[in-house]
Image: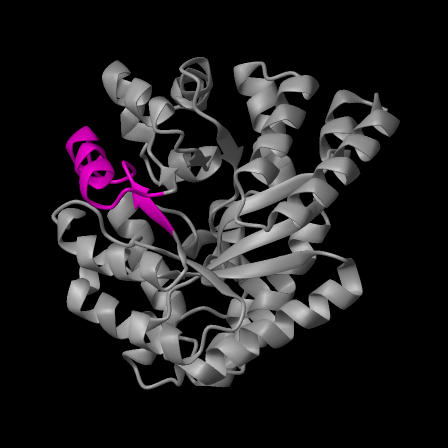
């Protein structure tokens, strides 16, 4: 078995993937037709051009366009099922999927019905592929903390399989501190808390995030690689970072993979996971993320497997499930080496 084949066979856990961002070009064509969206795309080739970005704001505009084609709650069942099917193809055992509820609630869709649709897709994919999945709700910081509170109201009414909240979306100009009350309330509700931070803005926002939001994990955090004291602080607080290397290249958050701070994070004692973020939109998969780290940054199979183990340990699974997965990962790894 070649090195790349071995990497593909490594067991994995995905901590940071957006359901909408997992929309395949052919599925977007179906959404355009089913929703009657007035978009000038008629082929997969058209959409491959559409999925090319100048920078992070441009990516957010593209993501918003895809969002607008989701006009029925039932659309989420297919999107979720196909996301998990792709993950299964990379030997991912568990997914923590991100769902930006207000993107659709604000346009009139029913939160409860969407959650039901997502969970139908999860149950079907679990039966078909053996992959499990939980839901993380992105409050989307550019909607403001008032909307964040409304989303928390919705979660209180319908929390099926929802285990965490997050703040993604536009970063520059939307500092984390105003979301403190949302995060405090989420913790009181028994939810885990994550924050996208340091992807589209600098280290000052990450420092502020640590002070006011006290996240259990940080998504991206690439700007932290510029600040040794910040990395030391993140490590001392025991906060893992959800790294999305190919995504960071595609959006321009990092200019070249050789300059990605993931190795520096690990050298400073920070636990990391490796994730695909919005895989079809960025032309990546979980397998590709691992392979790119091997090819461009020299990660060994042993180091990549350590990342897989750390992803399990820093996941939001219960202790029993973590122990079960860790044993399963070790058994599969033993058969590979």
Number of labelled discs? 0
Horizontally, is 253 left or right of 146 in the view? right
Name the foreground residue: 19 vs 51: 19
Magenta residues, as a range?
193-215
Dividing the picture into quadrants, the one containing residue 257 is: top left
Name the foreground residue: 281 vs 75: 75
Residue 28 within the magenta-colored segment of the rendering: no
Q: Is residue 54 visible?
A: no
The structure residue drawn at horizontal position 55% and vertical position 78%, both measured from the top left corner, is 117
The structure residue drawn at horizontal position 59% and vertical position 51%, both measured from the top left corner, is 318
Residue 105 in the image: state x and y as whole percent: 33, 79
Does 1 sit above or below residue 319?
A: above
Q: Is residue 245 visible?
A: yes
Residue 326 in the image: state x and y as whole percent: 71, 37
The structure residue drawn at horizontal position 20% and vertical position 65%, both measured from the top left corner, is 143
Residue 55 in the image: state x and y as whole percent: 29, 42
Does 312 sit above or below residue 229?
A: below
Residue 260 in the image: state x and y as whole percent: 40, 23
Does 241 sit above or below residue 54?
A: above
């Amino acid at each position: 078995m070649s090195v790349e084949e071995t990497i593909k066979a490594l067991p994995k856990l995905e901590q940071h993937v957006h359901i909408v961002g997992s929309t395949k070009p052919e599925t977007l064509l179906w959404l355009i037709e089913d929703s009657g969206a007035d978009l000038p795309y008629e082929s997969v080739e058209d959409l491959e051009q559409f999925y090319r970005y100048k920078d992070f704001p441009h990516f957010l505009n593209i993501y918003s366009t895809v969002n607008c084609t989701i006009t029925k709650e039932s659309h989420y069942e297919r999107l979720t099922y196909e996301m998990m099917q792709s993950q299964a193809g990379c030997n991912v055992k568990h997914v923590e999927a991100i769902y930006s509820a207000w993107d659709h609630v604000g346009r009139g869709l029913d939160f409860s019905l969407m959650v039901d649709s997502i969970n139908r897709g999860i149950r079907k994919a679990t039966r078909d592929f053996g992959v499990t999945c939980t839901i993380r709700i992105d409050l989307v910081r550019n909607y403001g903390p008032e909307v964040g509170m409304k989303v928390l109201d919705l979660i209180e009414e319908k929390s099926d399989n929802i285990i965490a909240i997050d703040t993604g979306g536009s970063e520059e100009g939307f500092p984390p501190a105003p979301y403190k009350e949302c995060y405090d309330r989420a913790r009181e509700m028994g939810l885990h808390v994550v924050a996208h931070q340091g992807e589209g803005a600098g280290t000052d926002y990450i420092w502020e995030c640590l002070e006011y939001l006290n996240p259990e994990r940080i998504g991206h955090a690439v700007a932290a690689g510029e600040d040794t004291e910040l990395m030391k602080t993140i490590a001392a607080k025991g906060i893992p970072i959800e790294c999305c290397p190919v995504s960071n290249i595609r959006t321009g958050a990092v200019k070249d993979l050789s300059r990605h701070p993931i190795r520096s994070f690990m050298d400073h004692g920070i636990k990391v996971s490796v994730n695909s973020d919005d895989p079809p939109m960025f032309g990546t998969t979980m397998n590709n993320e691992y392979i790119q780290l091997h090819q461009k940054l020299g990660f060994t199979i042993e180091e990549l497997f350590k990342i897989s183990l750390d992803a399990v340990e820093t996941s939001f699974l219960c202790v029993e499930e973590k122990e079960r997965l860790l044993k399963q990962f070790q058994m599969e790894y033993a058969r590979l080496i």
